[in-house]
Image (spheres, rainbow, N blue to C red):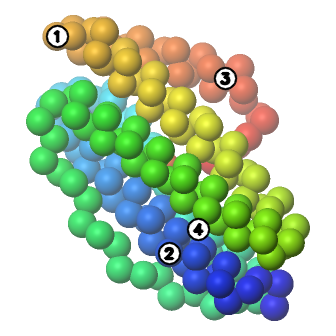
Amino acid sequence: MLISKGLQTAIIDQIGREFGAAMQYVNIASYFTAGNMLMFGKLFFKQADEEIGHGMKFVRYVLDAGGRIGVPAIPVARADFKSPEDAVAAALKWEEDVTAQINGLMDIAFKEKDYIAQEFLGWFVNEQLEEVSKMNTILSVIQRAGDNLLMAESYVMETLADIESVEGGEKKAS
Ligand SMILES: [Fe+2]
Ligand SMILES: [Fe+2]
């Protein structure tokens, strides 16, 4: 076994939260899609896929390290958004919480001198920088756009597509 029981338990909790994040993003994407803000809908459906990918990365890690997996219960995701700003603010808050959770996993890996886990978790540390920054950008654009949400959509989509094409190749498997 290349993973301690303690870290395995903590990662399994995180797997539940990553899948929970996916459900949260499905609700946010659906909120935008139902309101005919299709570009934001698309963006958040893509986020949902990414979160499933994060959960699966943790599953694979535990299995590769010789551990066992039992996916925990996933809390019901919010769906009662009052405005686009409310929906994106919820996503930002979520990503900030996830960042703290990933740091918590890293703390365990450091205490245990588990260098394999530290290396593995490093990917998630970088990913959270990207996720928090993305949600921050979307939120501030929505706030600045006021009623002009269609402008906010095309501005965000174009800008993010540009940034991603510049970064392209560096980090495909997010
Ligand atoms: Fe995630
Ligand atoms: Fe995320």
Question: Which numbered disc covers residue 112?
Answer: none
**2 vs 3, front mark:** 2
Q: Earlier in the sequence, mark 2 or mark 1?
A: 2
Residue drawn 32% across the image and 53% down it: 24
Residue drawn 43% across the image and 18% down it: 156
The residue labelled by disc 2 is 13
Quarter residue 55 falls in? bottom right
Alpha carbons under labels 2 and 1: distance apart: 39 Å
Q: Is residue 94 above or below residue 32?
A: below
Q: Residues within 10 Å of mark 4 (few under 14, many from 20)?
A: some
**For the residue marked with disc 1, what is the amino acid?**
Asp
Q: Earlier in the sequence, mark 2 or mark 3?
A: 2
The residue labelled by disc 4 is 56
Q: Can see residue 85?
A: yes
Question: Which numbered disc covers residue 147?
Answer: 1
Question: Which numbered disc covers residue 165?
Answer: 3
Q: Is residue 67 above or below residue 10?
A: below
